Amino acid sequence: MSDPVVEATDVVKFLGHGAGRVQALRGVSLALNGGELVLLMGPSGSGKTTLLSVLGCMLSPNMGSVRVCGQSTAGLAPEQLTQLRRHHIGFVFQSYHLFPTLTAMDNVRLALDVRGDYSRRVIERAKEALATVGLSHKTRSYPLELSSGEQQRVAIARAIIGDATAILADEPTAALDSENGHAVMSVLASIARQGTRGVLVVTHDPRILPFADRIIHIEDGRIVRKAGNGGASVPERTIS
Amino acid sequence: MARVEFVSVSRRGLRGGLRRLCEFTANTVIYLWLAVKFVAALLTGRKVAPLIFKLAARNLFHDRLRFAATITGIVFSMVLVTVQMGLFVSFRTMVATMIDHAPADLWIMPLGTKCFEDPALLDERERFRALSVPGVAEAAPVLVSFAQWHIPSGGTTPVLLIGSDRNALGLQPWNIVEGNLHDLSIPDAVAVDRSYFERLGTSGLGDTVEIRDLKAKIRLVTQGIRSFTTTPFVFTQLDRARSYAAISANKATYLLVRLQAGADPETVRTHLNQSLAKAEALTPDAFRSRSRSFWLFGTGAGAALFAGALLGMIVGIVIVAQTLYASTKEFSNEFATLRAIGSSSRYIYAVIIFQALLSAAIGFGVAAATGMVIVKATADSALPVLIPEPLMVGLFLLTVAMCVVSAIAAIIHVMRTDPAVVFTR
């Protein structure tokens, strides 16, 4: 395991305003290291997605700190957070969020396009990323011409093309059948095994437990248990 | 003290302004250079086209019905603006057409004359006063007056007589399509425009008609000398015009002044204004400006045209804004995804602005073609729509500005979108 690619320390996050204000995270600490695949599990409303948004620099914590590749996000302006996200974090969403009007190749290329990379090499890189997820034969297909599993794999290719060090996946298998879910998790696990990237997967899906290096359980905005894949609970501080 | 402070602030402001201008110019040059380099790299295959254009185009064309509605909105709006502005240009040109065609260095007219068609009269003594002013070589009288034209089939119609002697300083008809200018020297000869034949009840050259019970013969036919007031112009000799209008022989509406070589028009004008009793002298530019000011703004006609154009623009902005907003809202998941994967605000602005520019280019193309058809169709009307090239360029820039302004609502919507919504949709 290498140094943490994303690290949260005592993060507190409130959501909403006034009477509707709720504390979504209550002092969460965790670290995602390069080379590991971590599952974040918990019931609905436990704060999983909020934590993912905070780790992904989409939300700023009210208290505590977040570091991405060693850089603290404290005090950064929205555009600086965007820049951090652009260069270090890749996202995989439950609903894929592919652009229906772009081909698989262009959807993948988009992650480099937003960086202003228009060199000819982006075509090769997009092909490589699609090959990594086993879709080198679908470069010209539009999302609607792809199965759900294939769409999710295109989304993974988009997340990895920019050499992001942290891949944050939100319920990537929730909309997939067993076979496609297995294929998607295999891809994510192989990405983690390359050693440089850490993969954090938010999930409810017990079918994907075997892919995890670690499992973190969250309830009511607190991490209640961290475990190695053997299932034995491990003290929080030693695991991260 | 206060004055010193004011000067100091002004200088600072000037320096700041100059600095900003220099920065703007430098940035523009840099961006242009980068754009040229980028296009060159694209053409030579070293770069690939940014997806901004593809995203924008596909967002726009994705819903064809909405795209058609957008373009229809832009076209209607711009055709309205084009026609209003074309009429304005035409009106502006037509109200000064006689002044443009008079070979005068200066115009002398009764005090308070508002425009060329204002039929007040000067006494001949003013002519002698004018001729006595140093620098004046010649002062030729011109009569402009309404008269009754007897339609051969019955009834009368008003015409605007232009009476002028046939000399180098006269106000003569132009665009002659039948007859010869010399023929206007023949007794009873008049010149009318072809476009008024029906109105005047004549079949054209050689017809004998009556103006105020006096015989007149059409010996000259012109094309395109039309009055925006729809009252036909009738050119004739000065003395005949006086007879047709029943005006005494020592009266005229204008004196067209030719200056001696080397005379300064402004100096002579000043002297003329000191010498003339109930008249004033104006340069052609000043008279043109006064005529335009009267017809365009004094009568409210110009304001009405501008109001129509403004209305067209507002309609256009609302339609394009509404469509862009709806399109952006439909693609808000995609825009949120763009923000989530790290696209800068500038990238997202570019997508929306390019959508607006694409709409502008297509909408303007259709509107311009429609405008050209209208120009052709109205060419022979009382007030043809004129669209000179600078107006066309201006209208294109206006369309672009309109569409870019319309994009603001969409941009605000996107920038308010929380990228974290991608996790919940």
Image (cartoon, rainbow, N blue to C red):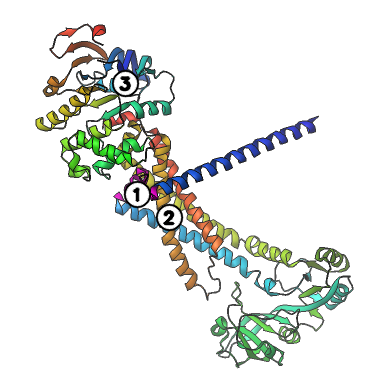
Q: CA distance from mark 1 to mark 2?
A: 12 Å
The answer, for residue B284, to whether it is visible in the render is: yes
Quadrant holding the C terminus of chain B: top left
Tell me the SS state at disc 3. Answer: helix
Q: Nearer the viewer, residue A41 or A118?
A: A118
Packing grade of label 1 (10 A; few <14, some 14-19, many >=20) is some
Same-chain status of marks 3 and 1: no
Residue B74, given in percent of the width and then of the height, sits at 42, 55
Query: Would residue B71 appear left or right of B98 to someone viewing this image?
Result: left
Name the residue: 31% across, 39% down.
A122
User: Which residue is denoted by mark 2 in the rendering?
Assistant: B361
Magenta stretch containing residue A219, yes or no? Answer: no
Can you identify the residue that label 1 sits on? B57
Question: Which residue is depicted at the point 19% across and 16% down?
Answer: A215
How far separated are the C-alphas under marks 2 and 3?
A: 43 Å
Answer yes or no: is residue A99 visible.
no
Q: Which mark is residue A55?
A: 3
Q: Have a look at marks 1 and 2 and say if they share a chain.
A: yes
The residues colored magenta run: B42-62
Please tell me which residue is depicted at 31% across the width and 48% down the height of the picture: B58
